[in-house]
Image (cartoon, rainbow, N blue to C red):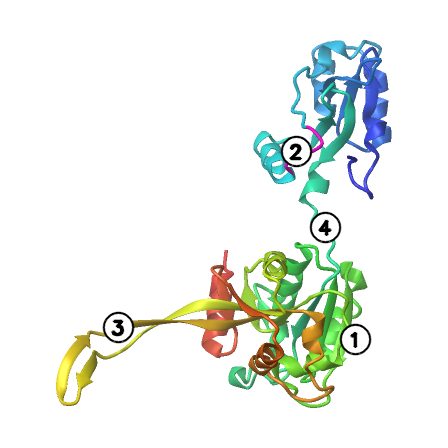
Amino acid sequence: MGSGSEGPSWEGALLPIGSTVREAARCLDESHLQIVLAVDGDGRLVGTLTDGDIRRGLLDGTGMADAIDGLVEREPLVVLADADHDVVLQTMARRRIHEVPVVDEGRRVVGLLTWSDLSRPAQRPNVLVVMAGGEGERLRPLTEHTPKPMLPIAGRPILDHIIDRAVAEGFRRFVFAVRYLGEVIEEHLGDGSERGIEVTYLREEKALGTAGGLSLLDDPVAPILVTNGDVLTAIRYGEMLEFHEQHGAAATMAVRRHEWRHPFGVVNTDGVDVVGMVEKPVESSQVNAGVYVLEPSSLDLLEFGQPCDMPALFERVREQGGRTIAYPVHEPWLDIGRADDYRSAQEGFRG
């Protein structure tokens, strides 16, 4: 178990316990890590040493030519190779440490877990498609010269918030389905290279609905995640993708519970007889949250360049025997389709 394929090698942090403070300082500098792993002649961990330990030692009168023995932390946090990374990360956060040595049963060093490696999400092969071609008619005049996904929230376009959340979960490949004022989006994002991501575009010649634009997509090799470009949510895209895969679904729709209080008392009758009455009842239903996961095979049910809405695609999947499931969303969610929704989104991001 190493410290990460792109990071510095943990072997560079190894140093014999009899080394000097000067050698330890050089080890820190050359390894580009923040820890020295002091080991005995058999490679067993004796203790650890950090830059802070060295500085405190120098303030207390330790010289650069002195041995590190007196500065080494003899009981550092260590883990075995099969340790749960989530638990390790939580422990590191609680103890405010950045590296944890990995040892075997004989306490020989076999690796190093670093905060940056554990907190960095694994890069996903899946494409995230953002449906961004709508005209936003209900938001006019705000959308007369600005496509809806480019409307600012907390000083940044909606689509930037979508990208940031996805990147934080390991997504690097993005496709934007554009039509109305699509050039504004393309000018803003380019090919994504400045953000460290890959961005391509599906250019709709006519309105293709909430799913039709996916017919223009090159055949994906893994399930794709699709989101409407006007949905602002704290949903965990990666967890939804994993939920989809765990349930063997062909198509997954994020849904959220919507409650509506009837403004009047509801009367139940049997002919002319009143058999019951409920005063202003609250009705509850599951509504489409505008985020989906689709298997590549589901896209085969779309006709190239022909309009199709997502409910219709789900129906086609069911008719072909595919499993369609719902992913319950409890996280904050807002569909920015009206001026009131836009104001709510702006207020929600204040502070």
Q: Earlier in the sequence, mark 4 or mark 3?
A: 4
Farthest residue to the front: give it: 321
Q: Earlier in the sequence, mark 3 or mark 2?
A: 2
Q: Earlier in the sequence, mark 3 or mark 1?
A: 1
Which residue lies at the image location 62% right of the left edge and 74% below the top edge? 149
| 196 w.r.t. 204: above or below | above
| 122 w.r.t. 198: above or below | above
Distance from the alpha carbon under mark 3 to that under mark 2:
51 Å
Marks 2 and 4 close (CB-CB < 8 Å) = no
Q: Which residue is mark 4?
A: 122
**Which amino acid is tagged 3?**
Pro
Please check the rendered image and state whether residue 10 is part of the magenta-colored stretch, yes or no. Answer: no
Q: Quadrant of the N terminus?
A: top right
Distance from the alpha carbon under mark 4 to that under mark 1:
24 Å
Q: Which residue is mark 1?
A: 218
Left or right: where 270 falls relative to 214: left
In front of the other: 336 or 88:
88
Range of residues picked out in magenta: 80-84
Q: Which residue is mark 3?
A: 281
Q: Earlier in the sequence, mark 2 or mark 4?
A: 2
Q: Position of residue 303 (x, y in %)?
A: 71, 86
Left or right: where 248 falls relative to 175: left
Q: Earlier in the sequence, mark 2 or mark 1?
A: 2
**Which amino acid is tagged 1?**
Asp
Q: Position of residue 168 (x, y in %)?
A: 66, 54
Marks 3 and 1 close (CB-CB < 8 Å) = no
**Which amino acid is tagged 4?**
Ala
Query: Does dot 1 land on a helix, a strand or a loop?
Result: loop
Dot in front, 3 or 2: 2
**Which amino acid is tagged 2?**
Ala
Q: Position of residue 287 (x, y in %)?
A: 46, 73
